[in-house]
């Protein structure tokens, strides 16, 4: 009864807040007509249709201030034909001021001069697409989820051309209607899309937008977009089927070592595989994705993270099959309690090595998109193979299904339901191998997400229930969160409960049997008259974890002050007041405990730390970010220095170095250690279609030195040849027969992908 009351009360609070959301007034609009002639995509705006098209102009600044027009103006126009949407844009800028990090596609935010075309064809203020072009015609595309969350892993077909002049550059963009997601209507009033243009100029850093976006919000926030009015209705894109086959071949070597790690032999494995993906537009707004025998060898390797916590770390999804409409599947719950986590698919926990192993995905299908203007559907089904760890240990073949429905209400808010089911085929396992596995695990849940029309109120509340043949895996997770974010301050509060029985085998639940409370407040002192300082932020944040009986497990209180500069640079300091109750012995070095040392005992621990961070901004070719944490740590002290230094070699590429250093000193006999993670990276572009990247990760915490080198040739639109080399070796000597660069394993893979449309 308490749970039910809690959920109902949370819903009422969030619904009451809707009355404060006032929609943006006087949104700018621009019209679009069907072209009378042929548009030649050459970057030159000389067609008659461009001369008669309405102009979107008078761009307003978003950064560093939102109170003035941009000194570097932009003009944009639209037209279309039966197959493509065309955009012509003129960006005023001195050619000598260009900043272009490289010629490689999908460049990161804040690294390159860019014009972004933001399209929300449903005007729901939550989901959209972004098409971006640099002055050197380097392209980038991405999807926007939950109003302003940009994901650059989405990939699709479109074209652009750029023409450069001394004091401006012109771009023409052609986006096939088959690439877009929209609903057709015979009612001209419904043929209106939300659009915005967001332009970033790196030198003397500035961001400006066509539809004004307050400086406190991300410039791509969809709720502030303007209106595209179709004077002639958009066409039916027709049947859209894309087949994307691949062939891959590789050679892998693994060093076989005995119990004292002495190398006994090498195991070589030659691999060959073929498979395909398919994209089928069931309707212009509903897409079916299929994959058979997928291969993800070309996906960028994860950045390693040093871990001094007791819990599993979260890594983002980068595989293309799982990206589009990702929020329909991956955003249910809180960050620390997700009922579905797509990174679980294709991975299995090896109970022998205590590490995650890759297992082949046999096939998958995903249906996602809009059923109508307000209702979205997501259906996912993926089957993964089994894997043998030893004679006694083997994982079963499993099938994971996810079904979600999301209904938009109150303008931008949504109510949604999710059902996740993992089936394990135990028939191929013997009695010993079946231990630890159940035939199924399911999670069902309801969720309400609040997004006010003016973006000031954001909230969430949910209830999830897990089901299993094992009664000890039938539990609940529920939560509520609310934040208020006007121009001058921000306040937030949230609560989460995960009981001891809640289990989501296909989800991300790093911790159970606890309650979580989060709160925080910030005040922004804007300084519009200052030539250097943009604003000063003063705030406090706190987190508290208790057990289910409300006994303290952890708390974290962080008062802080930060200064943001007009140059995009920033600096901040804070104090971290912490408490932790260890309910089982713990090694804070996570594996570096030495003979004679003991794990920290069960009990309470109090410690205080000082933190400082600084960022140079990206206006200069050399830029850096650094963070320092120093102070008490359990029964001793800790020093942590981390950051990134990068140098932009325009327009060839980027050389960077990530680093993370820990020094843990504990009173004897408790474990002390120093370890470092260094990650030099080089990204080189030889042209707009040939790229080379190398990423080295030297990690003494896990004693591993990883090399990942990837060559990519984009020989046709969204079609690539990859050659990927991966090498893992020991990072440092641990005994006479194990020294720096002693091999663990290595592999080289060649893969070709072609997009038939």
Image (cartoon, grey):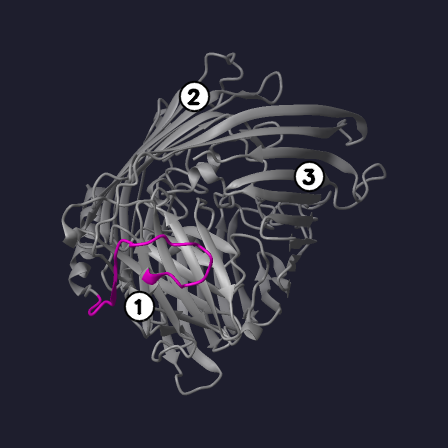
- Left or right: 163 in relation to 550: right
Q: CA distance from mark 2 to mark 1?
A: 58 Å
Q: Which quadrant holds residue 155?
A: top left
Q: In this orientation, which residue lies closer to the viewer: 753 or 460?
A: 753
Q: Earlier in the sequence, mark 3 or mark 2?
A: 2
Write the start and end of the magenta stretch as one range.
24-48
For label 3, the SS is strand
The Cα–Cα distance between marks 3 and 2, rounded to whole angstroms, is 34 Å
Residue visible at 73% across and 29% down? 253
Is the N terminus in the top left, top right, bottom left or bottom right quadrant? top left
Q: Which residue is mark 3?
A: 725
Residue 33 lies in the magenta-colored region: yes
Task: Give the residue number, with chain letter if any, for mark 2.
Answer: 424
633 on left or right of 743:
left
In the image, residue 7 sits, relative to residue 340, either above or below, namely below
Could you tell me which residue is drawn at 15 percent across and 46 percent down?
A: 186
Residue 55, numbered circle: 1
Type of secondary structure dominating the magenta stretch: loop
């Amino acid at each position: 009864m308490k749970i039910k009351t809690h959920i109902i009360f949370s819903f009422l609070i969030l619904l009451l807040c809707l009355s404060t959301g006032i929609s943006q007034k006087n949104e700018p609009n621009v019209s679009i007509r069907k072209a009378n002639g042929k548009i030649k995509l050459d970057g030159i705006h000389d067609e008659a249709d461009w001369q008669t098209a309405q102009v979107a102009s008078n761009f307003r600044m978003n950064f560093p201030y939102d109170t003035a027009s941009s000194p570097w103006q932009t003009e944009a126009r639209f037209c279309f034909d039966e197959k493509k949407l065309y955009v012509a844009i003129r960006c005023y800028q001195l050619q000598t001021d260009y900043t272009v990090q490289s010629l490689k596609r999908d460049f990161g935010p804040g690294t390159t001069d860019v014009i972004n075309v933001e399209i929300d064809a449903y005007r729901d203020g939550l989901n959209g697409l972004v098409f971006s072009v640099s002055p050197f015609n380097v392209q980038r595309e991405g999807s926007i989820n939950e109003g302003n969350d940009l994901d650059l892993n989405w990939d699709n077909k479109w074209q652009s051309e750029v023409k450069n002049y001394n004091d401006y550059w012109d771009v023409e963009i052609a986006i096939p209607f088959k690439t877009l997601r929209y609903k057709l209507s015979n009612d001209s009033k419904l043929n209106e899309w939300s659009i915005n243009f967001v332009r970033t100029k790196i030198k003397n850093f500035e961001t400006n937008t066509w539809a004004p976006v307050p400086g406190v919000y991300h410039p791509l926030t969809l709720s502030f977009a303007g209106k595209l009015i179709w004077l002639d209705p958009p066409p039916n894109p027709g049947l859209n089927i894309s087949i994307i086959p691949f062939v891959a071949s590789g050679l892998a070597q693994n060093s076989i070592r005995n119990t004292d790690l002495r190398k006994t032999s090498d195991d070589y494995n030659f691999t060959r595989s073929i498979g395909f993906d398919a994209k089928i537009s069931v309707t212009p707004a509903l897409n079916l994705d299929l994959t058979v025998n997928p291969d993800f060898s070309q996906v960028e390797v994860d950045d390693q993270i040093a871990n001094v916590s007791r819990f599993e770390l979260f890594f983002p999804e980068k595989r293309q099959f799982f990206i589009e409409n990702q929020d329909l599947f991956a955003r249910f719950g809180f960050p620390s309690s997700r009922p579905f986590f797509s990174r679980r698919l294709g991975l299995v926990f090896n109970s022998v090595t205590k590490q995650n192993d890759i297992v082949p995905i046999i096939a998958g299908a995903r249906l996602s998109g809009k059923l109508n203007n307000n209702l979205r559907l997501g259906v996912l089904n993926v089957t993964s193979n089994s894997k043998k760890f030893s004679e006694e240990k083997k994982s079963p073949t499993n099938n994971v299904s996810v079904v979600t429905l999301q209904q938009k209400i109150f303008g931008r808010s949504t109510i949604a339901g999710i059902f996740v089911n993992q089936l394990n085929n135990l028939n191929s396992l013997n009695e010993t191998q079946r231990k630890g596995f159940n035939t199924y695990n399911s999670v069902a849940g309801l969720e309400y997400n609040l997004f006010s029309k003016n973006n000031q109120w954001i909230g969430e509340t949910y209830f999830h229930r897990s089901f299993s043949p094992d009664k000890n895996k039938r539990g609940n997770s529920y939560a509520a969160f609310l934040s208020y974010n006007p121009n001058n301050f921000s306040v937030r509060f949230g609560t989460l409960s995960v009981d001891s029985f809640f289990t989501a085998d296909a989800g991300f639940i790093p911790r159970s049997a606890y309650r979580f409370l989060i709160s925080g407040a910030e005040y922004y002192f804007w300084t519009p008259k200052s030539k250097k300082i943009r604003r000063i932020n003063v705030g406090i944040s706190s987190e508290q974890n208790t057990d289910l009986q409300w006994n303290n497990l952890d708390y974290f209180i962080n008062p802080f002050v930060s200064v943001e500069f007009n140059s995009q640079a920033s600096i901040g300091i804070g104090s971290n007041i912490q408490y932790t109750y260890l309910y089982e012995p713990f090694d804070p070095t996570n594996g570096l405990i030495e003979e004679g040392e003991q794990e920290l005992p069960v009990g309470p621990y109090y410690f205080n730390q000082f933190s400082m961070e600084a960022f140079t901004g990206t206006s200069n070719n050399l830029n850096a970010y650094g963070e320092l944490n120093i102070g008490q740590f359990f029964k001793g002290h800790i020093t942590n220095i981390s950051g990134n230094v990068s140098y932009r070699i325009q327009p060839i590429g980027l050389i960077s170095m990530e680093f993370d250093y820990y020094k843990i000193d504990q009173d004897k006999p408790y474990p002390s250690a120093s370890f470092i993670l260094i990650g030099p990276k080089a990204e080189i572009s030889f042209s707009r279609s040939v790229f080379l990247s190398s990423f080295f990760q030297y990690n003494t915490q896990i004693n591993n030195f990883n090399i990942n080198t990837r060559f990519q040739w984009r020989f046709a639109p969204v079609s690539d040849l990859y050659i990927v080399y991966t090498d893992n070796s020991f990072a440092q000597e641990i005994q006479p027969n194990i020294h720096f660069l002693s091999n663990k394993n290595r592999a080289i893979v060649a893969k070709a992908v072609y997009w038939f449309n």
